Image (cartoon, rainbow, N blue to C red):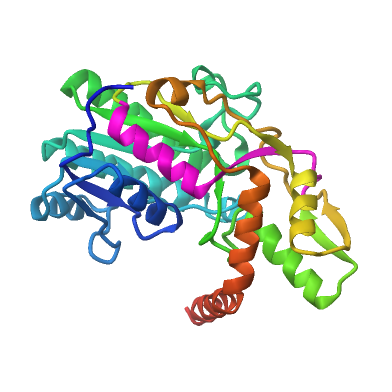
Amino acid sequence: MTSSNAVAGKHVLLTGGGGFLGQNVRRALERQAPLSIYAPRSAAYDLRLQKASERLFAEHPVDVVVHLAAIVGGIAANQRNPGRFFYDNAIMGIELMEQARRAGVKKFVSIGTICSYPKNTPVPFRETELWNGYPEETNAPYGLAKKMLLVQGQAYRRQYAFNAIHLLPVNLYGPGDNFHPDTSHVIPALIRKAVTAREQGLDYMEVWGTGKASREFLFVRDAAEGIALATAYYDGAEPVNIGANQEITLTDLAKKICELCRFRGQLKWDASKPDGQPRRCVDTTRAKDRFGFETKTSLHDGLRETVAWYEENRDRIEDDIASATLVRSKN
């Protein structure tokens, strides 16, 4: 860990600051004593456009950029939108980093994804394995788009001495997650299904895949703390995993969620649907050694809090989903 704090007393630009991860990262960054944090909305600055990024840096003082903004979704969303997921994510990061360099920004933090790893990476995933194969096909366009920001940052470091770092978080979850059935990731999707199945008195719940694939999940507040620590104290060229060091099969995950949601029916796996990457679990040694990050929240405690949050906010969430579906059908 470096001795100086790159955030303290600095102007921080946080893209995606209004989102699920962004709100938590903002709170974590505030504990690093920045002079200011500016989190623009996409309506004000469309970061896919060069002129929007130029205008952003012309209109606001920025010392440090934390780039969280992304177009994301689960396996189904990635299958439906491979072109959009590649283009929007790549172009946002590329334009933003270039304009940050031109504006004299001192540090740029790009948030990558575990989807960038090769499909059959040995577990636990080590950062040195990142280029040893092609990503799992269903989310390869998204994973490769984010991976290009690692390439860009390392190239800019060599040519321009630009301090760009790249972080690779595992699957996130927690209160405030996206529960929309078309775009949610596995944990919120399973929570919503289990609660609905319980209330409808169903005997079984349908789940995608075989249940044999494994994943690693990181509670959103822990992820935010890891990002804030890296922003403040990590200045290396090498990418860094941000994870929880806990692998779980989707079958065991679904059982845990059903138990917490008090659904006592059976799980019916639809093997005609893709599993995605066979296994996911990362080595977090580099994060601990370089900036002192270790997860604090167990999967059980994090799931329990997430289920409670969903049940407390369910009416509003379902109203939002219905409204979004209605708008989309009209368009």
Q: Residue 156 lies in magenta, yes or no? A: no
22 to 1, vertically: above or below? below
Q: Residue at x 81, y 60 (%)?
A: 206
329 to 129, vertically: above or below? below
Residue 127 left/right relative to 76: left
Residue 119 left/right relative to 13: right
Give the camera-side residue of 54 and 266. Answer: 266
Q: Residue at x 57, y 32 (%)?
A: 135
- On the image, the x and y values in percent for residue 313 come to 57, 73
Q: Residue 224 lies in magenta, yes or no? A: yes
Q: Quadrant of residue 126?
A: top right
- On the image, the x and y values in percent for residue 255 come to 80, 51
Q: Residue at x 48, y 29 (%)?
A: 241
Residue 238 left/right relative to 104: right
- On the image, the x and y values in percent for residue 327 come to 49, 80
- On the image, the x and y values in percent for residue 105 come to 15, 37
Q: In the rendered picture of this protein, how many numbered marks are placed on residues?
A: 0
Q: Quadrant of residue 267?
A: bottom right
Q: Residue at x 60, y 53 (%)?
A: 185
Give the camera-side residue of 308 and 17. Answer: 308
193 to 94, vertically: above or below? below
Q: Quadrant of residue 315?
A: bottom right
* Res. 192 visible in picture: yes
* Res. 181 visible in picture: no
Name the quarter where the N terminus is drawn: top left
Give the camera-side residue of 263 and 298. Answer: 298
Residue 220 left/right relative to 272: left
Magenta-tinted stretch = 209-234
